[in-house]
Amino acid sequence: MIYLILIPLLPLLAFALIAPLTKLWKRKSAFIATAAIIASSIFSLMLFFEAVKKGGPIKDQDGSFWTANHHPITFNWSLPNWLPLGGSDSIDLSFSADGFTLMMLLVVTLVSVCVHIYSFGYMDYAGKYYQHEEKNLPRYYGYLSIFTAAMLIMVLANNLILAFIGWELMGLASYLLIGFWFDKESAAVAAKKAFLTTKVGDLSLFLGVLTLYGVTGTFDIPKILEFASSHDTNGIIGVAALLIFGGAMGKSAQFFLHVWLPDAMEGPTPASSLIHAATMVAAGVYLIARLHPIFSGDMASSVVSHIGAFTALFAACIAIARWDIKRVLAYSTISQLGFMVAGLGTGSVAAGIFHLFTHAFFKALLFQAAGSVIHGVHTNDMREMGNLKKYMPKTFMVFLVGTLALSGIPPFSGFFSKDEILLTAYYYGEHGDGWLPYIMLSVAAFFTAFYMFRVVYLTFFGKYRGHGHPHESPSIMTGPMIFLASMCLIPSFVGVPGKHGSWAALFIDPHPHHGLNLQVALTSTVLAVIAILLAKKMFLSKSNMPKIELGFFEEKNPVLWKALSKRLYVDEALQWSFVKPGAYLAEQVAWFDKNVIDGIVNRVAGFGDKMSSASAFIDKYIIDGIVNMFGSLTKAGHKFMKMYQTGFISGYLFMILIMLALILLTQGYWVS
């Protein structure tokens, strides 16, 4: 179907159109990029509704619950022999879309549309604080376009080579967006950190792709999955799965490759919302889901589930101790990605992808609302905020909706998607695979509600502690936020679990799923409510209100606060374990190169120079001397002979006589 190629092609063409003409387009670039992504979103919606109509979940026999449609529709588009491999082998330029691919298309395109429109207002605001921002607009929208196109290529790719191309393009685009204000040292450093950290994962992914090719003999994803379904996934396929998971750890910020994501806040806030919600960080989760059969082995599933659950808990703890509103959301993203990865590791593609779907909307909403707050108060520090619900009522309402969704409060979408993951982890433990993921995820869910309502109370309640006059953002910014807020409720209707699972779960993965488990649902909800009340007591009650500026938490728990504020010393541990030893090794290699390798090269060069000088002397004074001597003798002979070339016959006869006389004398000498 032609729509499959048009969806990634349009933003790619927008980038190609904007990039070479940045001085000409200026603000027009915003309209070009936005029009392209709107068109892509329309095509995505058309495919989605076509798939729902022809192959979506259907009602069971008594009409009470949804059940899987065993003839789901898949869309395909292919250009054969796109990349010859030698002989008869080649790689096709092939795109494919099934249920959860279409869900991803909706996430990427709709969130990207909101980000593009929101950027109209935000970049105008940024222009007041950064010189010559108008001339940078084409660069900004060009980066957004290539970023979105790369994610769409990766999502639709039907073979691992094409997926890897999209994957790497995303890494490049994220580097450009994070370092967009490259004249700021912190932004330049953050961009390099993101690029290098994710490249560690990319190397692992590349090795995993090659390993899969070595085992299966193909890069085509359907053929790889077919091979995995009929072979043991605990052997070399399991090793390939773990290598691919290493790539996902980098892109989806799993412990310990998570360190780049909080620093990615240095980029423009709209770009942060796209990175954290629908594109780069979602790529790793999506890749695991797309290749899920190769992760079915005990080794791979155990590693994925435990790392995901630990990441969820670890990041949630650190988020408690952040004062920067964007960094709280950054660690929140890491934590929620951990939930998704744990859901996939415990065996449910539907749980992980549905949470990715819901998370994309409420996280994009929260980042845009945070950008609106920054727009209104000109600071990221929550200690300089307070009572903003009075000045920014629209922003407060949408931020509260996003917070309720993220905290897992019914009937918001996050409740259904997170509950699906907790339920999967619960059955994972019940079946004897270990209770640790469920326990860690439950505690992480508690901390999630706590730190998010800490943000709400510090930012929107109490007294205003900042400077200047807060103000609401313009409609061009609040409009996309209101749409995203509505998307925190609409998916709830398709996420309600039934006898065979929810509609969304069955659309993503047409296999029977677990129904509603009241024990798990009530436990997670009660934990969230307790966390909200605890945050209210600590950050909103009148007795504690004056201590917000001083840091109430620090006073009560100084050791714990210091550890959390230092991000549990993981960055320092990585510095001492890898970065500093790597830098020291680089310095030693540089010294060895300069003093040993260069010394040898320089000595060889010096010997060569002396040999060259000797050769030049011999050439100039001996070889050239001999040649010049013969030349001089020839020249002298020529001058001598010229004296006797008079042009008179008598002179020539005289010379002949002399020569004859000399010959006769010589002959006579030799005869005698």
Image (tube, rainbow, N blue to C red):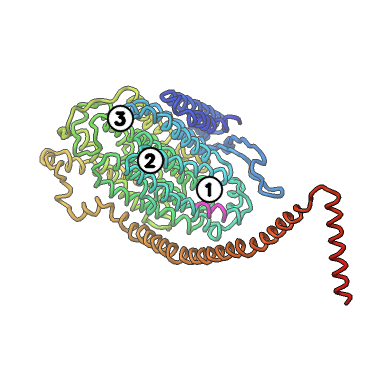
Q: Which residue is mark 3?
A: 398
The residue type indicated by label 1 comes to Leu
Q: Are marks 3 and 2 in contact (CB under 8 Å)?
A: no
The residue type indicated by label 3 comes to Val
Residue 264 placement: quadrant: top left
Q: Which residue is mark 1?
A: 291
Residue 582 placement: quadrant: bottom left
Q: Is residue 516 left or right of residue 91?
A: left
Decide whether residue 206 is among the magenta residues.
yes
Q: Is residue 269 left or right of residue 224?
A: left
Q: Is residue 420 left or right of residue 655?
A: left
Q: Residue at x 61, y 56 (%)?
A: 214
First in sequence, mark 3 or 2: give its number: 2
> Could you tell me which secondary element the residue under label 3 belongs to?
helix
Q: Are marks 3 and 1 in contact (CB under 8 Å)?
A: no
Q: Which residue is mark 2?
A: 179
From the image, which quarter does the C terminus lie in?
bottom right
What whole-number distance in Å separates the C-alpha atoms at marks 3 and 2?
Answer: 29 Å
Q: Nearer the viewer, mark 3 or mark 2?
A: 2
Is residue 118 visible from the viewing direction of this image? no
Q: Residue at x 45, y 63 (%)?
A: 593
The residue type indicated by label 2 comes to Gly
Q: Is residue 265 above or below residue 17?
A: below
Q: Is residue 570 left or right of residue 69?
A: left
Magenta span: predominant SS is helix
In this view, the residue in front, 64 or 79, is 79
Farthest residue toward the bottom? 672
From the image, which quarter does the N terminus lie in?
top right
Mark 2 burial class by Cα count in 10 Å: few <14, some 14-19, many 20+: many
Q: Position of residue 269 (x, y in %)?
A: 34, 35
Query: Which stretch did the figure color magenta?
Result: 205-210
What whole-number distance in Å separates the C-alpha atoms at marks 3 and 1?
Answer: 35 Å
